[in-house]
Amino acid sequence: MKSNKNKLLILARDSAAYARIIQDADLEGLEVIALDAIDEAERDFQGVNIILGEPDLIKPILPCMEHLEWVQSTWAGVRPLMEPDCRKDYQLTNIRDVFGPQMAEYVCCHMLMHERQSLKHFISQQQKQWETIVPGQLRNKSMGILGVGSIGQSIARAGKFFQMKTKGYARNPISCEYIDKEYTKTDNLKAFVRDLDYLVSTLPDTPATMGLLDGSIFSAMKPESVVINVGRGNVLDETALVDAVCNGKIAGAVLDVFKTEPLPIDHPFWTTKGILITAHTAAVSFPLDIAPIFMENFKLFQSGAPLKYCVDFNKGY
């Protein structure tokens, strides 16, 4: 049984909202400090043993957290806390089973926009031109999902609503009723992508996923294929992707995540016809969704029970 005296630092851009929800729950034995950011004058956190917050904000203060026992990330990804120079002598938990519906909406939105040629209609309207643009449809189109965790499964389920054919690629055997055909890491990735209309990546940022989608993969895809990346930017060879789109090896790409964020102003993604970018907004951490996960884990923490959604520092997820 853990001590009933715990001190929580909430470090997030919407920390006040998190604090209201957690304090309204009246969790016994929990003192709360809520901050949107840390400056040099605010680095005295004597007694803080728990942090709830965003990994990029948490990383700089780890060295001065003398009593740290547990960090609850408000993100699914925790890459900033995986860097070699970061301490790893505490429990780290992330967010799962929350972002799937948002990600599925994002992916379906952009697949539908592509099939219904929404951008062409918008341009025609701006030019006041009446053009009969024949649309496609998602029915019987094939979607391959790289990474079939909770997010990938939500996307597959949404695809099945539109009667799509689905394939999944994962490290371990896949157990998902919405996946028609599965591939594991021992299978040939080129065979996985060869007949896809849409390739959707939900993969995390790990050494194993670095540059996984390179020129050889894009060359193996159909010219009609579209890449959608909602996982992490490291999976893409960015130069190879621009080349593939510009030279008609694939039809285009929809990208929400990038190796460098914000995307540099001189990056070719901004001006490459066929590449549509969004600013890492495919799924957002809303306090009303995230705070209950922390509170459930806090009760487990107090009782000394294993926490949910623990991150393996060796694997990075």
Image (cartoon, rainbow, N blue to C red):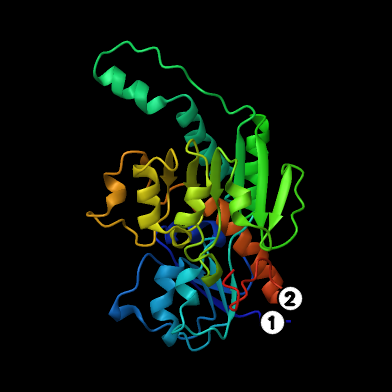
The three-letter code of the residue at mark 2 reads Ser
Query: Which circle marks residue 2 in the picture?
Result: 1
Q: Is residue 311 left or right of residue 244?
A: right
Residue 67 against residue 242 in the figure, above or below: below
Q: Is residue 86 left or right of residue 90?
A: left
Mark 1 element type = loop
Picture quadrant where residue 302 is located: bottom right
Closer-to-camera residue (284/178): 178
Q: Is residue 16 left or right of residue 129?
A: right
- Residue plotted at (54% across, 81% down): 49
Q: Which residue is mark 2?
A: 303
Q: In what quadrant of the picture does the N terminus appear?
A: bottom right
Return the x and y of residue 218 as percentages of the image width and height.
48, 50
Q: CA distance from mark 1 to mark 2?
A: 6 Å
Q: In what quadrant of the picture does the C terminus appear?
A: bottom right
Picture quadrant where residue 251 is located: top left
Return the x and y of residue 210 as percentages of the image width and height.
49, 66
Please state the total of marks drawn on the protein image.
2
- Residue plotted at (56% across, 56% down): 290
Q: Are marks 1 and 2 in contact (CB under 8 Å)?
A: yes
Query: Which circle marks residue 217 in the picture?
Result: none
The three-letter code of the residue at mark 1 reads Lys
Residue 253 against residue 202 in the figure, above or below: above
- Residue plotted at (48% across, 45% down): 227
Return the x and y of residue 141 as percentages of the image width and height.
60, 32
In primary-sequence order, the first of circles 1 and 2 is: 1
Task: Tell me, yes or no, if residue 211 can be seen here.
Answer: yes
Closer-to-camera residue (266/222): 222
Q: Is residue 278 left or right of residue 306?
A: left
Closer-to-camera residue (182/102): 182
Mark 2 element type = helix
